Image (cartoon, helix red, strand yellow):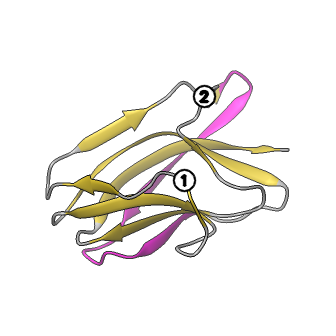
């Protein structure tokens, strides 16, 4: 699916009951991953955070508190993404307390 010359991807994420650092999109040389929407929930009270290049990488969102089993969603215009990874780095979700199940929507583009 293309919108404004961007090919949109959707990735289902299921941490299977284990809060952790989970790679959503693998690193791609010279590329940026741009998140334009995500929705889901945690199975227990906890936090969710988007990172570039794993748990030790760049914090893209800050740790956001989320209540157990309460769905949440965020979306943005593709021209103004919610988060953008550093060039050539993976897109990851880091959770504490509860495990995330949901979908992340975005696109990948070059420099």
Q: Which contiguous range is marked in magenta? A: 3-24
Separation (CA) of disc 1 from disc 2: 14 Å
Q: Quadrant of residue 38?
A: top left
Instruction: Decide if residue 103 is on the left or right side of residue 52.
Output: left
Relative vertical location of residue 82 with respect to residue 84 in this rendering, above or below: above
Q: Which residue is mark 2?
A: 80
Nearer the observer, 13 or 22: 22
| Secondary structure mainly formed by the magenta segment | strand
Relative vertical location of residue 64 with respect to residue 39 in this rendering, above or below: below
Q: Residues within 10 Å of mark 1 (few under 14, many from 20)?
A: some
Determine the residue positioned at 54% across, 61% down.
Answer: 51
Q: Quadrant of residue 52?
A: bottom right
Q: Are marks 1 and 2 in contact (CB under 8 Å)?
A: no
Nearer to us: label 1 or label 2: 1
Nearer the observer, 2 or 102: 102
Tag 2 or tag 1, which sits nearer the N-term?
Answer: 1
Image spot of residue 67 (x, y percent) = 16, 55
Image spot of residue 80 (x, y percent) = 60, 28
Instruction: Decide if residue 105 is on the left or right side of residue 34.
Output: left
The residue lying furthest to the top in this view is 4
Q: Inspect the magenta stretch and tell me whether residue 22 lies in it.
A: yes
Image spot of residue 60 (x, y percent) = 54, 53
Instruction: Decide if residue 24 is on the left or right side of residue 53.
Output: left
Q: Which residue is mark 1?
A: 60
Relative vertical location of residue 27 with respect to residue 56 in this rendering, above or below: above
Q: Inspect the magenta stretch and tell me whether residue 49 lies in it.
A: no
**Quarter of the C terminus within the rendering:** top right
Determine the residue positioned at 18% across, 64% down.
Answer: 43
Determine the residue positioned at 63% across, 68% down.
Answer: 53
Nearer the observer, 9 or 34: 34
Q: Secondary structure at mark 1?
A: loop
Q: How many marks?
A: 2
């Amino acid at each position: 699916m293309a919108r404004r010359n961007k090919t949109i991807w959707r990735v289902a994420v299921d941490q299977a009951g284990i809060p952790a650092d989970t790679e959503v999109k693998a690193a791609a040389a010279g590329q940026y991953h741009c998140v334009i929407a995500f929705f889901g929930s945690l199975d227990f009270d906890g936090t969710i955070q988007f990172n570039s290049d794993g748990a030790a990488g760049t914090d893209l969102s800050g740790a956001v508190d989320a209540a157990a089993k309460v769905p949440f969603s965020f979306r943005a215009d593709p021209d103004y993404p919610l988060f953008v990874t550093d060039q050539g780095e993976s897109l990851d979700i880091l959770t504490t307390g509860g495990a995330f199940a949901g979908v992340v929507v975005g696109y990948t583009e070059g420099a």
